[in-house]
Image (tube, rainbow, N blue to C red):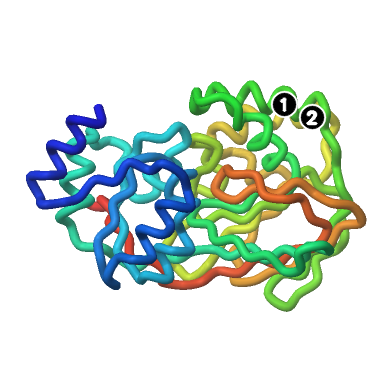
Amino acid sequence: MLGRIQAHALQFDADLLVSADIDSTRRVLQGLPAQSRVVIVGGDGSLHQWLPELVEGPFSVGLVPLGTGNDTARALGLRHLSWKQALTHALTAPAQACDLGQLEVEDLIKGQRLYWFISSLAAGFDAEISARAQPTRFGLPRYLAATLLAIRDLRCQRMQLHVDGQDWPAAEVVLASALNTRTYGSGMPMTPDASMHDGKLNLVQIQRFSRLGLLGMLPLMLIGKHRWHHKVKHQMFQSLRAQCAVSVALAVDGEPVPSASRWQVRVVPAALQVVDHLGS
């Protein structure tokens, strides 16, 4: 596959970099001229790990979705393309501005830590799933298997949210996650109305369930019908603060980050130029 991708890229005078490690690729990106077109061959995790450099460039970004989650590719309308079609499109099509999210975590040891995300911030139950799903690479089945394990070890947390200047009542929650794309977890339609171009993120809060109740909710989440349940709250927002008595599992774009008891989330409108295939 690598040889075929390289041969196809050479037709467009594009250089192919095979990443030895994250840091070496970051150094390469930091040395590129501003406005360069950077094409990522991989999934959400591959794109996520270089977001700071891609924004800083600034660069325009194309994506060839060969990952396991590919929720960003779904949002960009790329999932139906073959790798060759996706690569051609990524190298030649114009880019459009899309929103990104920022997670700021209060780390007692390292101080404030900042993480970019393009698809999702998971906080609570779904971040636990991401951590459990990391060792395997089987797309949606790995998430379903990790979900069953997380339900077995379910822990709800009392959480206080401050959303766009308004205090939400403190509540025992399963999760309180923010999405920039319609799906996460390899295609779960958590926020079907989400857009990467509206200057908003989408907050989903699911309040306390028993293990059996949450297991019954899972089929509704898989088809996007969970939103009408009385224990599910959804709101578009620009910024929020969250506070818990204990540390809560967190993940950005499916990649676990250190747990925290306090964090902030904000949208950064039109932060990145990305090649999409919507309406094509």
In this rendering, does residue 52 appear at all?
yes
Q: Position of residue 208 (x, y in %)?
A: 84, 42
Task: Give the residue type that dot 2 points to.
Answer: Gly
Left or right position of 50 against 39: right
In this rendering, does residue 242 appear at all?
no
Q: Secondary structure at mark 2?
A: helix
Q: Secondary structure at mark 1?
A: helix
**Of the numbered discs in the image, which one, if any, rests on residue 185?**
none
Left or right position of 276 against 135: left
**Of the numbered discs in the image, which one, if any, rests on residue 216?**
1
Residue extending farthest to the left is 11
Q: Position of residue 72 (x, y in %)?
A: 42, 47
In-front residue for pair 184/106: 106
Using a 10 Å C-alpha cutoff, classify the residue at mark 2 as few (fewer than 14 neighbours), some (14 to 19) or many (20 or more).
Answer: few
Task: Give the residue type that dot 1 points to.
Answer: Gly
Q: Which residue is mark 2?
A: 213
- Decide: marks 1, 2 in contact (CB < 8 A)? yes
Residue shown at the point (82%, 62%) measured from the top left: 109
Left or right position of 160 against 139: right
Residue extending farthest to the bottom is 165
Q: How many labels sit on residues?
A: 2
Using a 10 Å C-alpha cutoff, classify the residue at mark 1 as few (fewer than 14 neighbours), some (14 to 19) or many (20 or more).
Answer: few
